[in-house]
Image (cartoon, rainbow, N blue to C red):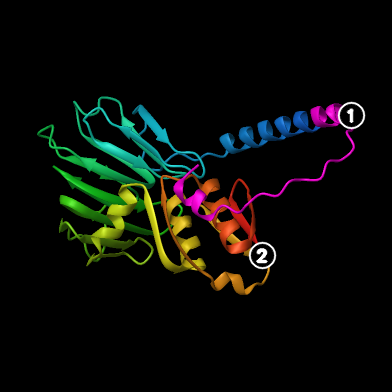
Amino acid sequence: MSAAQKQFRRPRFPLYMKKRRNWQPVALSLIMAILITAGILYYVAGRHTTPSTLLQPGQRYTTYQCPYGVRKTFTLPDSTLVILNSRSRLYVPQGFPQHKRDVILDGEAFFTIRRTLPLPFTLNTDKLNVTSQAGNFRIRSLEKQSGATMYLLAGNANVGKSYHSDTDNQRENLSAGEMILANKEIDLMEKETFTLAEQQDCLAGKLVFDNTPLPAVLKKMEDWFGVEVELKGRSNRVSKAVSGVFRNDSLQDMLAVLGDSVGFSYRITRDKVVIKF
């Protein structure tokens, strides 16, 4: 149990004992129905999985993907450390990094690039192209969305549009604390600055809330886990502020803690989290 759960956990009261019934046949039937339904959903989800549009025909890739509601950490053959966000995919071509050091991302991830090879590390999305010899950055670029962001936490990087623009193809050199905002629909790419501390907390797997309004907390969880949150019911508890630190907690753990603290129930579906007051 996480420290945050211990902080917010409510005392549990004993349940009244009920007359024992022969529930086993009913339970077995329910379990079988659940397993069959889950299998159908898994099969349907697999059939409708769309690969990245950037994949080259005839090229073989190793695909790293992260399931709903969790983040995955792994190391590539060139010693690049990757933290892949929920519902994201990273495609690494066969021959990486001997022939070239290029990868493709559809989703969100942190990358820690080490200067282990003379070739620069190159990341491609459908909106941005990022090259770096050594650096630490976070990028979010989903092919089903028009916008993209890239934050450089350390080192250096060179960023440009990954598509040809009729108006501006100028690339940007970034230093730590600088970021890129992009939108393919309106052909926009701008360099801005950001607060390093917040992104460094994310890299450390830490979410910090200090008297933060609940809507802002839920928005941060949406970005963190790559999920959609839907609120149902009306309550003044929606505006309640939250304080606490979550370290590498799962989506369900965080919802359980917040639900006990704020006072709501929740349901996690395949596509979203539904919160009811």
Tell which of 216 and 130 is nearer to you. 216
The residue under label 2 is 277
Q: Quadrant of residue 245?
A: bottom left
Q: Residue at x 35, y 26 (%)?
A: 60
Quadrant of image for the C terminus: bottom right
Q: Is residue 269 magenta?
A: no
Q: Nearer the viewer, mark 2 or mark 1?
A: 1
| Amino acid identity at mark 2 | Phe
Residue 148 showing in the rendered view: yes
The residue under label 1 is 22
In the image, farthest residue toward the left = 118
| Amino acid identity at mark 1 | Asn
Q: Position of residue 47 (x, y in %)?
A: 58, 35
Residue 6 — which label? none
Residue 165 showing in the rendered view: no
Q: Secondary structure at mark 1?
A: loop
